[in-house]
Image (cartoon, grey):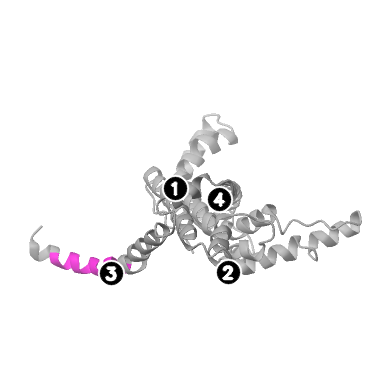
């Protein structure tokens, strides 16, 4: 390709490079400098990975994100298959309702979880009616898990429905004609065909769960996840270097998962807001 033709291509890349530097490379570089600029220097990262409080927060965030991802993929796969292959009155309204949580910030999702499982919520009223005690789960890791599931399903559901609509139904019919059961068709035909979409949307779900702050902030009592730990170190502890180091570690783990998912699925796995 001649230099005359490549010059416009480089010019077209210029806005992307400017945005990347302004909103990613420069802030990340500054964050790294802050993380090693404290009294401990580079040992801040070692402290973050060996201190039981920080390590527990990181592991709890990982377990919660993995559980959210697997549960969301299961629910979205079943619902997406049904909605993509069946037409019935009110289907469009139902799909719109299922994707409506995309419009809610994390704090609103946390408020909805409190309305469901808080001390004055629906589950508390049901518990008082049945055994005289308040059933609550909102202010725990269970409540955060419910909140994450709520705002993760729309992100995965849309991707799964789109992938199902592009599937070749003839492959399933051929498998059934050869005597394959529904379970075998699901395992050997449907899931392999949807594998790129499931991996890509699962990576987005995992990344969103790792970094979600608003819902955890609304349900902060007794919840020790990494975004809340970073917030506490920065605001209450005034430990800016540790907050920066934990942010780098959180971002690095999430980035590695996204990179792995992209290499496995060959799909675009960009975290949604």
Q: What is the distance, in whole Å, between disc 4 and disc 3 at their CAs?
A: 35 Å
Q: Residue at the spot x=61%, y=57% of the render?
A: 148
Q: Name which of mark 4 and mark 3 comes first in the sequence.
A: 3
Task: Give coordinates of residue 147: x percent, y percent.
Answer: 64, 59
Q: Check contact, mark 2 vs mark 1: CB within 8 A.
A: no
Q: What is the distance, in whole Å, between disc 2 and disc 3 at their CAs?
A: 28 Å
Q: What is the distance, in whole Å, between disc 2 and disc 1 at their CAs?
A: 24 Å
* Labelled disc at residue 49: none
**On the image, numbered disc 1 is attached to which residue?**
257
Q: What is the distance, in whole Å, between disc 4 and disc 2 at their CAs?
A: 26 Å
**On the image, numbered disc 2 is attached to which residue?**
105
Q: What is the distance, in whole Å, between disc 4 and disc 1 at their CAs?
A: 20 Å
Q: Check contact, mark 3 vs mark 1: CB within 8 A.
A: no
**On the image, numbered disc 4 is attached to which residue?**
54
- Is 188 within the magenta? no
Q: Check contact, mark 4 vs mark 3: CB within 8 A.
A: no
SS assignment at label 2? loop
Q: Residue at the spot x=60%, y=52% of the render?
A: 79
């Amino acid at each position: 390709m001649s230099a005359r033709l490549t010059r416009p291509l480089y010019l077209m890349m210029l806005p992307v490079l400017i945005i990347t530097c302004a909103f990613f490379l420069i802030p990340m570089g500054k964050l790294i400098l802050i993380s090693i600029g404290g009294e401990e220097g580079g040992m801040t990262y070692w402290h973050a990975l060996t201190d039981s409080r920080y390590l527990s927060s990181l592991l709890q965030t990982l377990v919660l994100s993995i559980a959210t991802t697997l549960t969301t993929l299961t629910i979205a796969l079943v619902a997406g298959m049904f909605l993509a292959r069946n037409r019935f009155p009110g289907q469009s309204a139902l799909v719109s309702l299922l994707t409506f949580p995309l419009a809610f910030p994390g704090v609103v999702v946390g408020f909805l979880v409190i309305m469901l499982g808080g001390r004055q919520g629906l589950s508390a009223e049901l518990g008082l009616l049945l055994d005289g005690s308040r059933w609550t789960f909102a202010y725990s890791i269970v409540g955060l898990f419910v909140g994450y599931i709520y705002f993760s399903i729309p992100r995965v559901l849309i991707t799964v429905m789109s992938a199902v609509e592009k599937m070749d139904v003839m492959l399933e019919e051929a498998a059934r004609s050869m005597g394959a059961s529904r379970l075998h068709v699901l395992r050997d035909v449907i899931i392999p065909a949807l594998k790129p979409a499931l991996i890509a949307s699962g990576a987005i779900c995992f990344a969103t769960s790792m970094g979600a702050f608003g819902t955890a902030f609304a349900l902060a009592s007794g919840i020790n996840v990494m975004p809340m730990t970073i917030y506490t170190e920065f605001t209450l502890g005034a430990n800016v270097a540790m907050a920066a180091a934990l942010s780098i570690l959180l971002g690095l783990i999430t980035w590695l998962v996204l990179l792995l998912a992209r290499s496995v699925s060959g799909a675009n796995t960009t975290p949604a807001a």
